[in-house]
Image (cartoon, grey):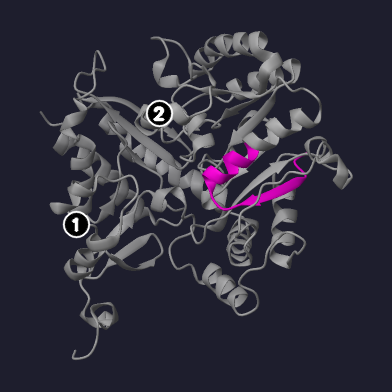
Amino acid sequence: MPGMSEAQTPAAVLNNATLAARDLQHVWHPCTQMRDHEQHPPIPIHHGRGPWLYDYDGRRYLDGISSWWTNLFGHAHPEISAAVAKQATQLEHVLLAGFTHEPAVQLAEQLVRLAPAGLTRCFYADNGSAAVEVALKMSFHYWQNRGAKAKRRFLTLSNSYHGETLGALAVGDVPLYRQTYQPLLLDVLTAPSPDAYEREPGETPEAHARRKFVAMEALLQQHAGELAAVIVEPLVQCAGSMRMYHPVYLQLLRDACDRYGVHLIADEIAVGFGRTGTLFACEQAGIRPDFMCLSKGLTGGYLPLSAVLTGEEIYAAFYDEYAAQRAFLHSHSYTGNPLACAAALATLAQFARGGVLESNRQLSARMAARIAPLAAHPHVVDIRQCGMILAVEFAQDRASRNPYPWQQRRGLAMHRIALEREVLLRPIGDVIYAMPPYVLSDDECDLLVDTMIHCVERVCGD
């Protein structure tokens, strides 16, 4: 159209190819080797409805990973969308220092009611990594305020992941993410993961977790005087290939942290809000952490928001006269953003109606039954599930579990095959997984699991 710049081109003339070409001129994508897009350009998404994403060329994709584990009740959910739109006409943002607003207050009240008893204080941040940073700093600062100056280190699990800002990266243990930045990171202690995949033949997941805890307790005993906190992902190490472990480990850890005077940080960012079968994963162990980090599903996948819940004892260590210089001086410009809080409140309203967790249990059982025949595949070494997280691990050799050479990028091949079948899957190394929204129909659930089976059969058929 004469006189109109490319950026002003009407949406009607857009298609996948033109928008992808424009994207690659300026956009640097996360967790991506951009050169890959020379052969496979990014797929522009025009809109979403329920569990489906639709591109500009009219193709659709079942969102089998909840858009990086965030979307709980489907895209463009009418009630969540309406809540955000209504809030935008009233107040889009105000600083949360010296001011407040109803959505932030109401959300904090609801989170405190839902969380394990004793978590009574809510500190907002922008995203999951920021929530982890808050919890680490708050734990360290607590001990400083209490005069325990030596308690400045953290203990984490092998194969863990807590985000990619420097503090969060330091307490993670996935080499792919942290190896390059190692010189910049805190010095942390690492205990062996209770990952049930590594159990001995005939050993139950519970027995394995108990055996692995011996090493954790030894580290706590030896380093209690210098440890501020232990941080774990309850039940599932998501970015660590969806490895899972028995809840008894959390019970043992809570007891040991109490005995040795060390905080327990539960990173529920990916596993909270119904993902593991209970509202929070910690519920399955019956424990209360000292800090609980929440994000991702908190807003139903709409807007960035995170929260750190803690208790009165922690809060009291910072509560003093200004001259004492004990305040927790951590802030983000968009802390407690009203639009994000409105999305979170509308998301929690879906749970409040009831039936979500029961529906998830039915979907989980259907997924388990549908995937079961794949256990006989000669290259499948493990099928594991925790609620609405289903993972299949494949290997070059079933008996030895030797992985395929990473250079073969078999997970990437599965991703592309799934797209051909109108399903969005994004395998992690030699693990293909599903972590879908909670609104799948039976047919959509079957399509998702059948696509996982098809991918394994196609890519591991040699």
Tell me the residue at 59%/71% (across/down): 83
Whether residue 126 appears in magenta in the rendering, the answer is yes
Between residues 214 and 153, which one lies in front from this camera angle? Answer: 153
Residue 353: percent from the left, percent from the top? 63, 60
Q: Secondary structure at mark 2?
A: loop
Q: Is residue 244 visible?
A: yes
Disc nearer the start of the sequence (2/1): 1
In which quadrant will I find the N terminus?
bottom left
Q: Which mark is residue 53?
A: none
Residue 37: percent from the left, percent from the top? 19, 52
In which quadrant will I find the C terminus?
top left
Determine whether, in the image, residue 412 is placed left or right of residue 123. left
Whether residue 52 appears in magenta in the rendering, the answer is no
Number of other residues with Cα within 10 Å of mark 2, as a class: few under 14, some 14 to 19, many 20 or more: some
Determine whether, in the image, residue 78 is placed left or right of residue 333. left
Q: Which mark is residue 41?
A: 1
Residue span colored magenta: 118-135
Name which residue type carries label 1.
Answer: Pro
Tell me the residue at 63%/48% (across/down): 307
Q: Is residue 162 visible?
A: no
Distance between mark 2 and mark 1 Cα atoms: 27 Å
Which residue, given by chain and number where applicable, does mark 2 sit on?
174
Which quadrant of the view contains residue 173? top left
Number of other residues with Cα within 10 Å of mark 1, as a class: few under 14, some 14 to 19, many 20 or more: some
Determine whether, in the image, residue 196 is placed left or right of residue 379. right
Between residues 452 and 180, which one lies in front from this camera angle? Answer: 180
Tell me the residue at 46%/55% (across/down): 71
Which quadrant of the view contains residue 155? top right
Question: Is residue 2 placed above or below 283 in the rendered structure?
Answer: below
Residue 94: percent from the left, percent from the top? 67, 68
Name which residue type carries label 2.
Answer: Val
Q: Residue lying furthest left in this view?
A: 462
